[in-house]
Image (cartoon, rainbow, N blue to C red):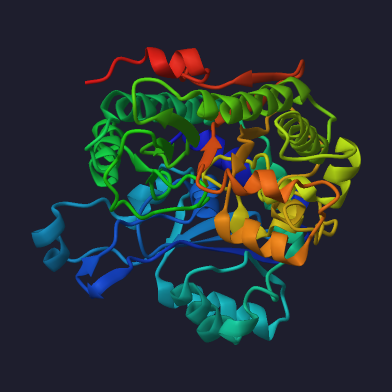
Amino acid sequence: MFDRNIYVARRDRLRAEVKSGLVLFLGNEESPMNYADNTYHFRQDSSFLYFFGLDFAGLAGVVDLDEGTDTIYGSDLTVEDFVWMGPQPTIRERAAKAGIVRTGTIARLEALLADARAKKRPVHFLPPYRPENKLKLMNWLGIAPGKAASEASVELIKAVVAQRAIKGTEEIAEIEKAVNVSVDMHIAAMRMVKPGVTEAEVAAAVHRVALAAGGDLAFPIIATVHGETLHNHFHGNRLKSGQMFLLDAGAETALHYAGDLSSTMPVDPRFTERQKEIYRITLAAHEAAKRALKPGVAHSAVHLLACKTIALGLKNLGLMKGDVDEAVRQGAHALFFPCGEGHMIGLDVHDMEDLGEVYVGYEGKPKSTQFGLKSLRLARPLQPGFILTVEPGIYFIPQLIDQWRAEKRLAGFLDYDRIEAWKDFGGIRNEENALITAEGYRILGKRKPLTIEDVEAVPRD
């Protein structure tokens, strides 16, 4: 945990931004894999961590906006629990570390909420994503599980987004720690990638680095020779000469702050000339996006700059044609780049995604419905303290190419005959994590091999 005064200050700021009533933060429960005592790795809710810092199951926190009190609710463990878990702090001892002196049982919380409902006091809560928390809201507040998200407090969502979006110095240091471990994960992969190695072996080695650093994975590892599948979690292929290998992996620290990096490397010691052609275009888009990062610039503009750089590079290669600006405006580039250029990171690898992209990335404004652009998670103007990914890529997705060609979609900008010869290419993505500063940006963490020369210079085991 951070110093208790940090959590006190965060809750005090929340009081200044939400008008009245109770704010209910639901911590997460243990989640069984196949029976009650065999659970998945526990992960606390990120907003609960942000305001209370308590990384234990079965807790709930209440900020009483009218009385100015904070309370942690939960059940102390029994002697039977100690047999399996060893001595554990009491709820009161844990709460004190977050600067909270008031504690109570879950039964007392139920009574508090019943009283609030009877008196028509507002009870603010965030959109629940765990089924057990939806059931709690049904039992305690009478909200049907299917309506829990729509009944969440927009006032609270906006207040939490406003706080969590701007990272404090202690958060920046923790994220930088996560990025440093993530760089080590990627270098470990670069060292061992070669013909005959399996994707699973690389994934295992990468995971080991995260665990050995005292944390874990920020998200399931993408380790694949099929980089054209954006979120490919299958690890059953054996690497072959002539292929490229894409790794998207990040570490989560013990305090649950995330790093998120991607690298693309040749299975052989060197890239082929054909691979270099596409790699250079993605790298040009990557560098163009980084140069554009500064306060006040809309991230949608950064995304479109990366798109235009990709479109121009592919036009020079003969795969696209026509006016580049118009091609991007109509979305022709999305055949090769169907996702967003970047997203915010913090306590979540897609920071605050459970609170809704329209609030986190769009300040409440509607998102585009255009293919490709609708996948951009962050469009709002950048501010100092934002931490975001930079990750434009180029992907040759055979099924998408076939569909667009059959529909003759945007044929004035796409040379389908030439594209056909690239359908087996795969995909390339490289990714770094950037902090927006008052002057511009700073790439977090130690240097990750990024250029063709950097990647090829990493010694193979």
Q: Is residue 279 left or right of residue 262?
A: right
Q: Say which residue appears at 75% left-offset and 38% top-offset.
A: 307
Quadrant of the snapshot with the C terminus: top left
At x 80% / y 41%, what residue is drawn? 300
Q: Determine if residue 337 is in view.
A: no
Q: Nearer the viewer, residue 313 or 354?
A: 313
**The image quarter in which residue 402 lies:** bottom right
* Residue 331 at x, y percent in the picture: 80, 50
Quarter placement of the N terminus: top left
Q: Residue at x 58, y 61 (%)?
A: 399
Comparing 70 with 234, the one in front is 234
Identify whether 351 is placed above or below 84: above
Quick one: 441 or 346, which is closer to the camera? Answer: 441
Task: Count all numbered tags in the image, as a single digit.
Answer: 0
Q: Nearer the viewer, residue 321 or 227?
A: 321
Q: Is residue 160 left or right of residue 301?
A: left
Indicate the position of residue 216 as horizontal and vertical percent values. Answer: 33, 42
